[in-house]
Image (cartoon, rainbow, N blue to C red):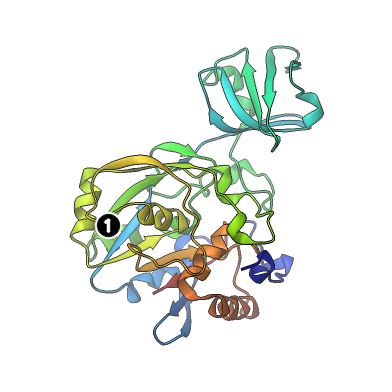
Amino acid sequence: MELLDFDFNLPKRLVAQTPARPRNHARLLVYNRSSRQITDDYFYNLDKYLPAQTTVVLNNSKVEKARLRFGAVEVFIAEVLDPFTVQALVRPGKKFMPGKTTELNGGLIKIETLAVDHEGLRTLRFNKKLNSSVLDKFRLTPLPPYIAQNENLSEDYQTVYARPLGSKAAPTAGLHFTPEQLAQIKKHWPVAELTLHVGLGTFAPVKTKNIDQHKLHYERYELSAAAAKILNNSQHITAVGTTSARTLESLKRPFSAASGQTDIFIKPGYEFKNADALVTNFHLPKSTLLMLVAAMTGLDELHRIYRHAIAQNYRFYSFGDAMFVV
């Protein structure tokens, strides 16, 4: 398949800049693969559509304040190598040339550029420890580029069940849950948590015409023994988010406690082994996230679903509405 197979036109007005309030008052599009029926509802009614025998799987990774902004200069930390050294994207690039030391905040903060790779990722060494309070006032929540930076939205950009720090972007399908709704679901369905720390690679644009030539970057995951036990007792699994689905599909049955890295790229033609249903948001054109959803719905049906969502003014992307593929 080619990249253009996953393109569509989205009116800018449908790109959500703020979340629904309360969270679970986002709209919910339900797509039934057996009947091909589309139903319009609200996320607070998700339990009406959850299969009776399903287990709900959540990604509990918490978003780090990985963006450091010093006026017009920005450092987006992709990976911490040691207490002083990171790999990062920077802006403007000309201020971070190999062998050069960049002075910021009146010279109090100094950053040496050790190397730069072919994708522009810099290896940087700070003169302060990365957990230093000196850096605190420069830290920002890494909201995606299509949302105006607004630190007042930092808590909205975390799921209510987020715990271990490590993600560079939120597992956004889970943003719709309120504590009350999640508690209600737990009364009737098993819920298992896993961790996949979302990296920049998940959201990197696909640059190859043939999507089979695209490679995802590795992301770290972890599954506890307790969660594995719940999954092994499951007849049906609903993955909340593409990150949960990718982690599940990276694991083998019977499930057991595991940690590691995955670069699994799920696209049409893939046969799901572990995830039977998917809660997700509406994704960017030509993105790997959209390709994963198409693997579950079929490409033609995906385009039909998205045409319906656009016609019905669903809100798109991270703070947008939700979709349940069952």
Q: In which quarter of the view is residue 130 placed?
A: top right
Q: In which quarter of the view is residue 225 placed?
A: top left
Whether residue 315 sits left or right of residue 178 in the image: it is right
Q: In which quarter of the view is residue 142 placed?
A: top right
- Identify the residue shown where x is 47% and y is 42%: 219
Is 13 drawn above or below residue 198 in the view shown?
below
Q: Nearer the viewer, residue 70 or 119?
A: 119
Is 123 drawn above or below residue 255 in the view shown?
above
Q: Position of residue 9 (x, y in %)?
A: 72, 71
Residue furthest to the right: 94
Q: Residue 45: in sight, yes or no?
A: yes
Whether residue 188 sits left or right of residue 181 in the image: it is left
Q: Position of residue 103 (x, y in %)?
A: 75, 15
In which quadrant of the rendered image does the N terminus lie?
A: bottom right
Which residue is denoted by mark 1 in the rendering? 191
Q: Which residue type carries mark 1? A: Val
